[in-house]
Amino acid sequence: MKPRTPGFWLIVATVGLLALLPMQALAGMSPEEVKMFTETKAKAEKGDLEAHFNLAACYARGLGVARDQAEAVKWVRKAADKGYPMAQFSLGNCYDNGNGVTKNAVEAAKWMRKAADQGFAHAQNTLASYYANGKGVAMSQAEAAKWWRKAAEQGDALAQYNLGNSYKLGRGVAKDQVEAVKWTRKAAEQDDAPAQYNLGISYAAGEGVAMNAFEAAKWYRKAAEQGHAEAAKSLDKFHTESLKWFRKAAEQGDAEAQNNLGKCYAIGEGVPQDFVQALKWYRKAAEQGHAEALFNLGGRYYNGEGVTKDEIEAYAYWNLIRTTDEDARRNLAVFEKEMSAGQIAAGQKRSKELQKELATKKAGK
């Protein structure tokens, strides 16, 4: 898996001058742009480092002045020479891509390191990729992992994704699927589509985390919704294969598969949503003492999904597993505040009856 780096040479698309300009100014030269350019240049000439950087953005984009990459680099360099990390990162990218200067990987790495040493996460991630590929520096997977970790610990999603891959493949660090999932999840939770796809793979294969078809499908879906083609393919394939396996195992009496098939019907995962079918399979699993199925049955009765709404029955199911299931305890704690003493007594009575019913059915199998 190839390391990923920020896809721009100046961060001014989201910070600095561009964030201050009115949107219509971006379409071409305007009085507002010219005024902003003039004010920014005046500040830059007085030594304001942020203005140096923003002035470079004006020249790079042609905002309020004719586009001039060489002049843009000149002002970026002024800020970089004075220790402004965003400018150092940008100058490194200029050398990396040949924007306003001759391409020079060694110079790119030099400036990227200066920004990285100041804790600039994008630079740390990029410097890590240089080490991973031997670009402008001697190749070192250990150094790559080191810099990815620094950026990842600051919450940089790209670095978290890359560090996760380092652990997954054992590049620069000891292979560790649990750590791989840990860092991949952090990136996935920031809506990084490739990380969401990889997390789906981990759940599907049971690598670094317990195998879980629904978690796999959830993360595949999140990535697919962002246009990740491989995730979309995996989701379609996974639906077909997992549903086929769940149904076969459920019909053979496997409680876990019965509960999972119930979830498929409850949320419409690979099949049309059908609360009646969901209830049927949850009940079969519950009759074997499956805790999650008991919880899910309580939920169906509480919401009236596939069955007439019955809060006493919901209470009874959740009460059966309150000592072992945190979600059931949480639900009951809220539920009991809303119930009368009589309703609670009725729920507890029904819970005892239900326990006997389930024990009888389980014994008869």
Image (cartoon, rainbow, N blue to C red):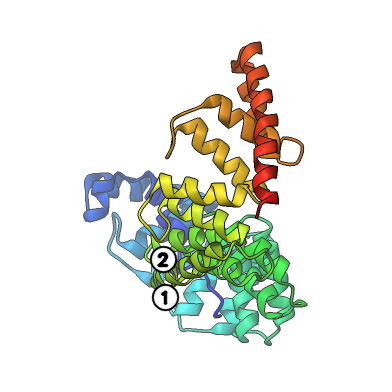
Residue 193 higher or lower than 18, as above or below: below
Left or right relative to 318: residue 307: left
Please state which of residues 261 and 155 is positioned toward the viewer in this rendering: 261
Report the quarter where the N terminus lies. Answer: bottom right
Please state which of residues 288 and 60 is positioned toward the viewer in this rendering: 288
* Label 1–label 2 contact, CB within 8 A: yes
Question: In front: mark 1 or mark 2?
Answer: 1
Residue shown at 54%/53% (left/top)?
49
Residues under labels 1 and 2: Cα distance? 9 Å
User: Which residue is identified by label 1?
Assistant: 99
Furthest residue in direction top, as rendered: 341
Q: Quadrant of residue 304?
A: top left
Provide residue 114's location: percent of width, then percent of height: 65, 67
- Identify which amino acid the numbered label 2 is placed on: Ala
Query: Circle 1 — which element?
Result: loop
Provide residue 218's location: percent of width, then percent of height: 49, 58
Residue shown at 46%/51% (left/top)?
15
Please state which of residues 314 and 48 is positioned toward the viewer in this rendering: 314
Residue shown at 63%/81% (left/top)?
132
Provide residue 214's location: percent of width, then percent of height: 53, 58
Q: Is residue 192 visible?
A: no
- Identify which amino acid the numbered label 1 is placed on: Asn
Query: Circle 2 — which element?
Result: helix
User: Which residue is identified by label 2?
Assistant: 72
